[in-house]
Every structure is written in C-alpha cells, then in structure tokens.
Amino acid sequence: MADLEVTERSRLRRSHERGAFDRETINAILDAGPLCHVAYLIDGKVHCLPTFHWRVGNRIYWHGSAASRMIKNAVQQEICLTVTYLDGFVIARSAMHHSVNFRSVMLFGKPEIISDDEAAAGHLKNFVDGIFPGRWDTLRPMSDQELKATTVLSMAIEEGAAKIRSGDPVDDEEDYALPIWAGTLPIQMVAGDPVPDARTDTSMEVPESVKKFRLGRAD
C-alpha cells in the first residue's frame, strides 16, 4: 500500500528528520494503544475530544454518542485526529536541550458515519475484541436502543504524518565536558492485575478475554 502523500499541512516544518509518512510506521503507532484526540470546529470554535480509536486496514474508526454535537458535526467538516505516546523524558546538560522521547501521528480528513446497523455493530465488535480478544461473544447482546444511541465514525488514512523522537539527549558539544548527569528516564504504560467489581461473584475466575488484554492490535 502506498505511503501517505506529503501535503502542505502534513509536511513537518521543524525537526523534519523525525517525520515519517510510510504506512508501516503510522499504522504501528495507531495500533499501539486505543486513545486518541479528535479536534472539531463547531460554530467557529475549536473543540478537542479524547476518545478511543481502532484501525482496520487503511481506515481509522472511533465512536461516540449519537446525541453528541461533535459527532453530528463531524461529517460536515474536516477534522484532525492525533495519537501520542510518551516513551521517556530526555534529561540534558542544559535546560534548553531537555526533551522527551515520543511517538505521534496526526491525521486529517473528513469522517463518514457508518449508517448500516449491522456494519456498525460489526465495527464495535472489532473494537472490543481488539482490546479484549474474544470478549464480545461472552457479553449480553447489544440492544437495538444501545446501537441507536451509538454512532461509529470512519475516516480513510490518506493525509497525515508520524513524528518520532528516540535516543539520548543532544547537547552542545562543549557541554559534554560538564560534570552534569544526563540521560533518559523511560516511561511505560503497564496494565495491573484485574480487580473484580463489588457485585461480581467472587468464585468466578478472570475470563480469558481479560487475561489476553493487549494494547497493540492486528488487522
């Protein structure tokens, strides 16, 4: 599949050497976790909404309340969707050169609503099973009212860019001789042990779908 085309708004103005437009890099970052932020313009004012996303092939999906103003307005405009992971603090020998190691993707496009109920339910199943493999089929079936209250949005991954920083601090050459500690402080997102809610039968074991929890996804 072709890489993303570099456009006037997707090209990197600063630190362009950290940019990437190949789908392998972009998809890996999108798949590394479910949290994104979507920026909408409503009545001339910018709103940015955190939500969960998932990817299938060359399309990215997210969902929200059918009553949401942002969801209703999304199909009438172009939006900006961003995903960012903090991988570490970069601690340099001067304040100026402190930084962070990170992976990020910014996408632009016009979303579409999945209007077919069967298709929408299928995408929601993909979303749940993408995080908790096999979970959907163990749950109470989704009601018609629940499905009606939920809107699934989809957008082609056609315009955007990844930006990544990794490695050691980059100090001024003369600063390396200073007796100042420098390095990195890695940051990781780690899942803890499952905790049952107060009304779960204590004799029940943690289901396999929860044990198989994953942040990364596969098509």
Image (cartoon, rainbow, N blue to C red):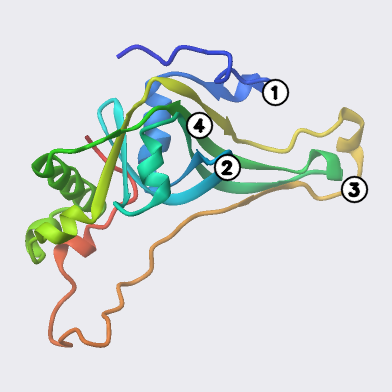
Secondary structure type for disc 3:
loop
Mark 3 surroundings within 10 Å by alpha-carbon count, few (fewer than 14), some (14 through 19), many (20 or more): few
Q: Quadrant of the N terminus?
A: top left
Residue 142 visible in the displayed image: no
Label 2 to label 3, Cα distance in Å? 46 Å
Q: Earlier in the sequence, mark 3 or mark 4?
A: 4
Q: Nearer the viewer, mark 3 or mark 4?
A: 4
Camera-nearest label, 1 or 3: 1
Residue behind mark 4: 106
Q: Residue at x 56, y 32 (%)?
A: 164
Q: Quadrant of residue 109?
A: top left
Of tags 1 and 4, the one toward the viewer is 4
**Nearer to me, 88 or 34:** 34
Residue type at the position of mark 4: Met
| Sequence order check, earlier mark of 1 and 4 | 1
In front: mark 2 or mark 4? 2
Horizontally, residue 39 falls left or right of residue 131, namely: right
Give the alpha-carbon distance from disc 2 to disc 4, as whole Å.
Answer: 16 Å
Q: Residues within 10 Å of mark 1 (few under 14, many from 20)?
A: few
Q: Looking at the rendering, which quadrant does residue 96 occupy?
A: top right
**Residue under pointer 2:** 46
Image coordinates of residue 72 in percent, x first then y, are: 36, 43
Q: Nearer the viewer, mark 2 or mark 3?
A: 2
Mark seen at residue 131: none
Q: Are marks 3 and 4 in contact (CB under 8 Å)?
A: no
Q: Earlier in the sequence, mark 2 or mark 3?
A: 2
Q: Which residue is mark 3?
A: 179
Q: Secondary structure at mark 2?
A: strand
